[in-house]
Image: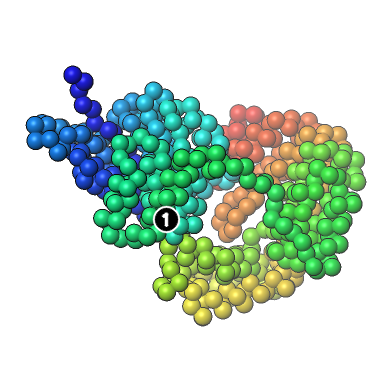
Amino acid sequence: MVALQPIKIAILAMGGEGGGVLADWIVNLGEENGYFAQTTSVPGVAQRTGATIYYVELFPGAENPLTPKPVLALMPMPGDVDVVLASELMEAGRAVQRGFVTPERTTLISSTHRVYSIAEKSAMGDGRVDSQALIRHASLAARQFIHFDMEKAAQESGSVISAVLFGALFGAGVLPFSRAQFEETIVRGGVGVKPSLRAFSLGAEMAAHPEEAHKPQSAESAPFNPKNKQVVQLLARIEHEFPQHTHYLAREGVRRLIDYQDPAYASLYLDRLIKLFSQQGGNDERLQRALVRHLALWMSYEDTIRVADLKIRHSRFQRVRNEVRANDNQLLDINEFMHPRIEEICETLPKNLGKWLMRPHWIHKALRKFTQKGRTITTSSLGGFLQLYLLAAWRRGRRTTLRYQLETQRIEQWLSAVLKAAQTNPALATEIAQCQRVVKGYSDTHARGLRNFQILMDIVDSYGAQLVPADLRELREAALADEHGNELRKCRQRLAME
């Protein structure tokens, strides 16, 4: 006689995604159809709204009075899980890392969308984990790997991701229950039945037909078909004056700088690039791509005007409503904690006034004391919105501000260092161009990045053409690894560049 074995299911979900509801559905599905069922949960570390492992075991024979009541496990064990359901791609990666997924046994079902971890978001550089690498590793680790963007499917159906996962679980064909039994479970739940059934159907269809879920998406940028004559002229300049390999990045740079300031500012961007490309060594393709990208990023630096503009955009209000799943009939307050330093206030003023206010007189001291405490602005209220609206409207006077004068000076010094290096070593010039990555963010973050950037530029000035490109790259990556400069200091010591 073959001994009966339980079906072991692990669910890895984050807060607010309905992981507990999904576990309850699976338990109810089993209990209503002749199975013993048990569920437990193990809360995880409070990252990305808190990740929790729900564990379900189903054992057949509950309808047979002769079947002894089984003793079911309380938590998953490595190498001993039949099905893993992950509500986000990184959670699937964690399941693989913990050994819950095995190629001989486990069906892995995961959404491919990402909710970035604290470590990814706080990195000075691009700290994101490669999603394609996660998918490759998960494919190798699992017996069957079903994956698609379940968050998108949930939004399309007006439901939550747990219902899509439940549908994908049916579509995977790994449980001995019919579609009707799955759907009856949702109906018995009695909450959000219609949208949950829509999400279930979509998840089941995508899991059963993975070729539809993985149709290649176009990588082209959004259409940019302007009617403004100035913008048309800018695009024509790119088409006729720039090398083909820079067209995409240059168009994106123009788009960004028009959004940031105006077409005239985007024209200045193109003028600077044309001047750089025409200099000795400026025809190196890798250097040109780096300059097109990083000059646009630096010219769209984050000042108080930019921050205010981004916080009151309709797209941001809509994104927040979507994140908290507020419907059109619900009121939503958005409170912004603002803590500008006195430096940000002075730099937002016209150049001469800003310089005067930066001097250590009694008005400066009073203002500094006033700015020591932050304040909360409710941007969803009329008063709060108007405060940031008026600040954002000051972008018309951005060219007169102290911050604009300072950033222009820094940009010109950086470009001068790039050009000087390009005359003898385009590879070194490219590394200098990419040092712009260190300068980013707002307020204290920007100040720390600028300090590390200046250390790199001092090294460039000191060593000149003798500086090895690989050494500068290593120094730059060290600066990006730690905003406080500790890793950069260690790297300088290791390379004897103190």
Q: Is residue 457 left or right of residue 27?
A: right
The residue under the point 51% across, 73% down is: 379
Is residue 404 depicted above or below 152 in this figure? below
Residue 100 occupies quadrant? top left
Circle 1 crowding by C-alpha within 10 Å: few under 14, some 14–19, many from 20: many
**Horizontal side of residue 131 vs 356, given as left or right:** left
Q: Whole-percent x and y of residue 400?
A: 75, 70
Image quarter (top left, top right, bottom left or bottom right) of the N terminus:
top left
Which residue reaches farthest left?
Answer: 66
Any part of residue 39 in sight: no
Vertical relation: 128 (above or below) 184: above
Q: Position of residue 99 (x, y in %)?
A: 37, 28
Q: Is residue 9 left or right of residue 334?
A: left
Q: Quadrant of residue 270?
A: bottom right
Q: Residue furthest top?
A: 1
Q: Nearer the viewer, residue 256 or 457?
A: 256
The image position of residue 418, as x and y in percent, is: 80, 43
Q: Residue at x 34, y 59 (%)?
A: 193
Q: What residue is shown at x 42% (from left), y 53% (from top)?
A: 199
Q: Position of residue 439 (x, y in %)?
A: 65, 50
As rendered, which of 15 and 167 lies closer to the eye? 167
- Give the residue number, with chain letter if any, for mark 1: 198
Q: Is residue 409 above or below residue 459?
A: below
Report the quarter where the C terminus lies. top right
> Which residue corresponds to the image point at 48% horizontal and 27% vertical from the top-left?
140
Q: Quadrant of residue 363?
A: bottom right
